[in-house]
Image (spheres, rainbow, N blue to C red):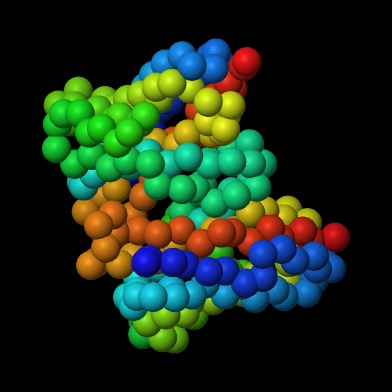
Amino acid sequence: GQNIDQPTEMTATEGAIVQINCTYQTSGFNGLFWYQQHAGEAPTFLSYNVLDGLEEKGRFSSFLSRSKGYSYLLLKELQMKDSASYLCAVRDSDYKLSFGAGTTVTVRA
Amino acid sequence: GAVVSQHPSWVICKSGTSVKIECRSLDFQATTMFWYRQFPKQSLMLMATSNEGSKATYEQGVEKDKFLINHASLTLSTLTVTSAHPEDSSFYICSARDPGGMYEQYFGPGTRLTVT
């Protein structure tokens, strides 16, 4: 099984940077995903890491260290619309995703 | 590309009745679909893996006789909540695996079930 930990809540100011950490203990690691979820909606894909290192996609970047069981999602130039829940998910060798509890990010003006 | 739809988007039913939720992959063939449940302020919990043409694989603690899954074609999987109770009220989300897609798994928009 998977054990995935991420902070419950984070607050940041518009225009700032926020880093959401995720640690995991897993069997059969086959990739780590970050999703954004607004209340009442399904998750939307943000990023995917399967190898160590940093993946950058516009304002969002994600980092993975497989040896440490650690990932982070970096959100730059925060906008009000970035207020949402961010889910860290680990995929196993059967392509099943296990999700962390999610981090609620609140962006303040 | 890689669009997954769900129907209905929300449903209210009375306790003791059954509700069917459909999950369709619109522009790709999905040999595998996944069903998740999400309670308020909680994360997604995988309920079962649905494979086309074979029986679904249920996660520990999920009653297979209560949550019936049928994956009759490469583009359609259905989840039927039988004898629904108020505690089954939740947000049900499906995802479909597209091996040819870049990120493999694509989520539907979810179905909000309320049992009164």
From the viewer's side, name the closer residue of B8 and B115: B8
So how many labels did they put on this image? 0
| Residue at image location 51% in from the left, 62% down from the top | B108
User: In this image, A68 relative to A97: left or right?
Assistant: left
Is residue A39 placed above or below B73 in the rendered structure?
above
| Residue at image location 44% in from the left, 62% down from the top | B95
Is residue B16 placed above or below A55 in the rendered structure?
below
User: In this image, A59 relative to B90: left or right?
Assistant: left
From the viewer's side, name the closer residue of B52 and B86: B52
Q: Quadrant of the C terminus of chain B?
A: bottom right
Residue A83, percent from left and from top: 57, 29
Residue A68, percent from left and from top: 20, 23
| Residue at image location 32% in from the left, 25% down from the top | A72
Q: Quadrant of the N terminus of chain B?
A: bottom left
Q: Is residue B9 visible?
A: yes
User: In this image, A25 relative to B85: left or right?
Assistant: left
From the viewer's side, name the closer residue of A67 and A15: A15
Q: Is residue A24 visible?
A: no
Is residue B89 placed above or below B65 in the rendered structure?
above
| Residue at image location 16% in from the left, 29% down from the top | A53
Quadrant in the picture for residue A13: top right
Quadrant in the picture for residue B56: bottom left
User: In this image, A66 relative to B59: left or right?
Assistant: left
Residue B12, percent from left and from top: 80, 65
